[in-house]
């Protein structure tokens, strides 16, 4: 449900931006509010899930995500759509912090890669269905239906998920959440991600940007000091220092999503507004990437059980860098086949990276820390997504100037904004490829072999 929502909205954003009269920053905030909320809540909720029971947190996440979908479908302006997306982000944090932990705990170490491959396949199935379904709904009905479709899905999954109560073994403790640490971490993340999201409007050297970055640095410092002294810390700092496979696996995930997440959003805008494709046509063109990810993920997950995760994750990041470089090299008159092929290379890269990386990270911790590990990995992904939208989105819009986004929405490929956006899109893809290369380097440390 969550990946379906994410991929559908990337196709619908140009139409939503026009009908809701969103600025470029407002359009970015439709995605960023969801991701920022997840980033702040993931680790505290993951810690709580390990202590209070993962399944009930998972089911609560489904309910919240469905409620947020109702709010987004009925939104009438920028404020209401951003608020609804934040509610969806709360539900997404509950889901992301528990789902991989539930799957990991149900399988032995020898089948962990296979299990994570199937789990990732479900994610990519949602991504695969999203673009063509989103294009159809936007062109045939309205953008409101991209959120309405979540409601029956959420109800069915919530009722079905209750049947897991007899199948999932829950372990609970009477430990308390480190509230002080959670607050310091939340302030640090908000203060970091907010100026990154709004830098195109505020500027890197503005007083607000400088103030928030300073607050973020102080809050991160205070968080680390707090965690070293806490009896039951939110994050065991010793785990980050001594468990290098866990640490580098999370760094690789961060860089992977910094590279990849904005590709869907920016490519959708690039196809529709800079090249004149309809929403449904753009959806079909973008379908190749998630289809390959969905088809290949179970295979790469199972393969990682036999050959290990390091070679697969490095290969995946290199292929991702290659695919983004190919997109950057496409000219204004590029045909559909080269675009689909370039996105397909990215799809192969993501399939080779995601399941093996998840297996390596989840296999490097004890079973009592699975939700925390899943939440930490989810936080790296969400922070990476937010940074991707902020950095690559800012680069893509860097030459639009004042009124350029509205010109692009109004005149599309016929206006002056199209040339400026094409230039920015090309530079954004090259930048993302650089992040992917750094991610390949982070995959070098040998994964820890866990028998639990």
Image (tube, grey):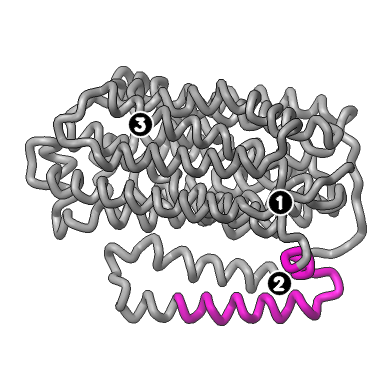
State which region is magenta: 213-241
Which of the marked residues, 3 or 1, is nearer the chain's N terminus? 3
**Residue 228 highlighted magenta (yes or no):** yes
Q: Secondary structure at mark 1?
A: loop
Residue 113 is situated, as x and y percent measured from the top left of the image, at 73, 33
Residue 188 is situated, as x and y percent measured from the top left of the image, at 56, 71
Q: Give the residue at x 45% y 26%.
A: 130
**Residue 301 highlighted magenta (yes or no):** no
What is the total number of numbered labels drawn onto the structure image? 3
Question: Mainly helix, strand or loop, the magenta region?
Answer: helix
Q: Nearer the viewer, residue 228 or 130?
A: 228
Q: Quadrant of residue 115?
A: top right
Give the left or right position of residue 192, taking residue 234 as reference: left
Q: Which residue is mark 3?
A: 342
For residue 414, above or below residue 31: above
Which of the marked residues, 1 or 2, is nearer the chain's N terminus? 2
Q: Quadrant of residue 341?
A: top left
Residue 427 is situated, as x and y percent measured from the top left of the image, at 27, 51
How crowded is the residue under tag 3: few (<14 C-alpha within 10 Å), some, or many (20+)?
Answer: many
Q: Which residue is mark 1?
A: 446
Give the left or right position of residue 17, taking residue 321 as reference: left
Q: Is residue 79 visible?
A: no
Which of the marked residues, 2 or 3, is nearer the chain's N terminus? 2
Residue 360 is situated, as x and y percent measured from the top left of the image, at 72, 45
Q: Secondary structure at mark 2?
A: helix
Mark on residue 181?
2
Q: Nearer the viewer, residue 195 or 317?
A: 317
Q: Quadrant of the N terminus?
A: top right
Q: CA distance from mark 1 to mark 2?
A: 31 Å
For residue 234, above or below residue 163: below
Q: Give the residue at x 27% y 38%.
A: 269
């Amino acid at each position: 449900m969550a990946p379906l929502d994410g991929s559908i909205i990337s196709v619908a954003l140009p139409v939503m931006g026009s009908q809701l009269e969103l600025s470029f920053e407002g359009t970015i905030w439709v995605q960023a509010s969801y991701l920022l909320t997840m980033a702040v809540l993931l680790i505290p909720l993951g810690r709580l899930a390990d202590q209070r029971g993962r399944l009930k947190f998972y089911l609560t996440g489904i309910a919240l995500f469905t409620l947020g979908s109702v709010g987004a479908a009925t939104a009438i302006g920028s404020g209401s759509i951003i608020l609804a997306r934040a509610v969806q982000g709360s539900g997404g944090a509950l889901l992301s912090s528990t789902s991989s932990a539930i799957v990991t705990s149900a399988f032995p170490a020898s089948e962990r890669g296979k299990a994570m491959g199937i789990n990732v396949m479900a994610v990519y199935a949602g991504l695969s269905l999203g673009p063509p379904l989103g294009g159809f709904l936007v062109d045939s009905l309205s953008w409101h239906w991209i959120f309405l479709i979540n409601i029956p899905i959420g109800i069915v999954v919530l009722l079905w998920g209750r049947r897991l109560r007899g199948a999932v073994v829950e372990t609970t403790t009477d430990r308390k959440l480190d509230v002080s640490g959670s607050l310091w971490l939340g302030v640090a993340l908000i203060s970091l991600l907010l100026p990154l999201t709004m830098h195109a409007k505020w500027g890197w050297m503005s007083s607000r940007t400088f103030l928030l970055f300073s607050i973020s640095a102080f809050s991160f410092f205070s968080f680390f000091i707090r965690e070293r002294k806490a009896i039951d810390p939110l994050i065991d700092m010793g785990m980050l220092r001594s468990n290098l496979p866990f640490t580098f696996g999370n760094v690789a995930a961060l860089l992977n999503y910094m590279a990849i997440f904005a590709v869907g959003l920016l490519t959708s805008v690039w196809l529709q507004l800079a090249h004149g494709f309809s929403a449904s046509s753009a959806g079909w063109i973008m379908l190749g990437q998630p289809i390959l990810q969905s088809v290949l993920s179970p295979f790469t997950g199972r393969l990682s059980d036999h050959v290990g995760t390091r070679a697969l994750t490095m290969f995946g990041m290199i292929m991702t860098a290659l695919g983004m470089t190919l997109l950057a090299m496409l000219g204004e008159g590029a045909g559909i086949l080269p675009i689909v092929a370039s996105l397909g290379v990215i799809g192969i890269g993501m399939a080779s990276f995601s399941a093996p990386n998840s297996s390596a990270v989840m296999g490097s911790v004890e079973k009592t820390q699975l939700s925390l590990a899943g939440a930490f990995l989810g936080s790296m992904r969400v922070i990476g997504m937010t940074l991707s939208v902020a950095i690559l989105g800012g680069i893509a819009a860097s030459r639009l100037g004042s009124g350029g986004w509205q010109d692009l929405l109004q005149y599309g490929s016929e206006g002056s904004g199209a040339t400026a956006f094409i230039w920015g899109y090309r530079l954004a893809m090259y930048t993302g490829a650089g992040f992917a290369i750094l991610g390949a380097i982070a995959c070098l440390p040998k994964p820890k072999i866990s028998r639990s």
